[in-house]
Image: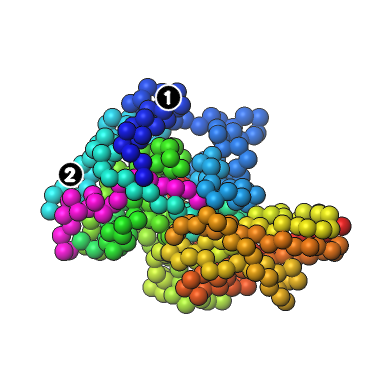
Amino acid sequence: MNSRRNFLKQMSGAAIAAGAAPSLLTWALPAPQNGSIAVPGEDGMIVRSFRFVDLETPVEYFNTWLTPVPHFFVRNHMHEPSQLNAEDWRLTIGGEVEKTFSLTLSDLSKLEMHSVVNTLECAGNGRSLHRPQVPGIQWGKGAVSTARFSGPRLRDVLQRAGVKPAGKHVMFRGLDEVPGKVPPFIRSIPIEKALDSDTLIAMHMNGAPLTKHHGFPARALVPGWIGAASCKWLTEIKILDSEFVGNFMSPGYRFPDQPGKPGEAVKPEDTHPLTALNVKSVISGPLDGASLKAGRIAVQGAAWAGEADIAKVEVSIDGGASWNPTRLGRDQAHYAWRLWNYEWKAKTGDYTVLSRATDTQGRTQPSAPVWNPSGYLYNAVDQVKIHVA
Ligand code: MTE
């Protein structure tokens, strides 16, 4: 848990690091130079979109339980706020409440802080692997990362406002800069999840104030759920009597009620909003296409399961005919991925190495994903092809 004094110290540190007066942070991305794309502090990340800054984490970075912030994937639907005056920033709480009020950054940092280690995954992670292919950002396997998020519980703020019995959903609005006619990124979550003691108004990531890419000064953190639930650059929380109606609730971020045939259209009335993540594992090493020497080879990766915990991860080196148990890493927390590894005494040959996770709800990664028109929640058994010489 972070004390308030620590928070304020780190806040001013972040402002200085940003090279700005503490009260006014101005953010601008440099234009691409000589055809290359420069995103400061994000070395090694895979740029999926420069216009709105969408950065994927290479799978070989899945080797630490907590992802260093510069290696944490970034997903933006629109422009990040170009300016944010921390002194003028306000978070308003209204709608179906007894008392509407707003909080300054200093008010927020005086509230009791709580920490949650959460694996945040974009619902579209793995979209490029669906067949037939679907439109949208063509994420590979790395729109997922893990961090310790800290901040006041959303519940504490809602209790202060006094949610009326009519209040059933909690809407978040961020400070994104909306280009042209694009609908704003506004979504809602059910009141039960909002009142969960692990749902936060996060101000810190891995012990430091949020960076601009991850929602400075405050974001929602809805653990175990698709990343889209965790609204960045939070400025308004509104209690509604029903689910928010808008593009990012429908048609966006919905999943077919029943799996259909790959490539087949799905009627909107046969879909539901996405909430918790699937069970999933990814191999972080060896990398796909690697050529390795015979002998001991460490097969390793990460596995996560949204609101459930990982029960086991298995590896197959014979294309799925037989499965071997892996060793799960020591670090663990509810909502956080587990690192895993398997020591394989490899003989020469060409191999397809597979990984398969099972969670505490009894869900196991399927051999084929559930195809859907937006390419959400890809979670098929992972595989890499390698050559052992
Ligand atoms: N919040 C706002 N305001 N605007 C956005 O575009 N993207 C969402 C979510 N919160 C988004 C947002 C999506 S789709 C994801 S996956 C996560 O932020 C990604 O969080 P990150 O960029 O910190 O990794």
Please name the amino acid that badge 2 sits on.
Answer: Phe
Spatial distance from mark 1 to mark 2, Cα to Cα? 30 Å
Mark 1 Cα within 10 Å, few/some/many (few <14, many 20+)? Answer: few
Q: Position of residue 209 (x, y in %)?
A: 40, 37
Q: Residue at x 76, y 57 (%)?
A: 297
Residue range corresponding to the magenta coloring: 145-166
Q: Residue at x 27, y 45 (%)?
A: 112
Q: Nearer the viewer, mark 1 or mark 2?
A: 1
Q: Secondary structure at mark 1?
A: helix
* In the depicted structure, whether residue 282 falls above or below residue 361: above
Task: Tell me, yes or no, whether the highlighted magenta stretch contains residue 147.
Answer: yes
* Left or right, 105 with reference to 325: left
**Residue in the foreground of this view, choosing between 208 and 180:** 208
Residue underneath mark 2: 101
| Residue 48 seen anywhere in this rendered image of the structure | no
Q: Position of residue 218 (x, y in %)?
A: 35, 42
- Which dot marks residue 306? none
**Residue in the foreground of this view, choosing between 95 and 7:** 7
Residue underneath mark 1: 16
Please identify the quadrant where the N terminus is shown: top left
Q: Residue at x 23, y 44 (%)?
A: 92
* Left or right, 90 with reference to 40: left
Please name the amino acid that badge 1 sits on.
Answer: Ile
* In the depicted structure, whether residue 213 falls above or below residue 376: above
Mark 2 Cα within 10 Å, few/some/many (few <14, many 20+)? Answer: some
Please identify the quadrant where the C terminus is shown: bottom right
**Model colouring:** rainbow
Q: Secondary structure at mark 2?
A: strand
Q: Residue at x 36, y 41 (%)?
A: 2
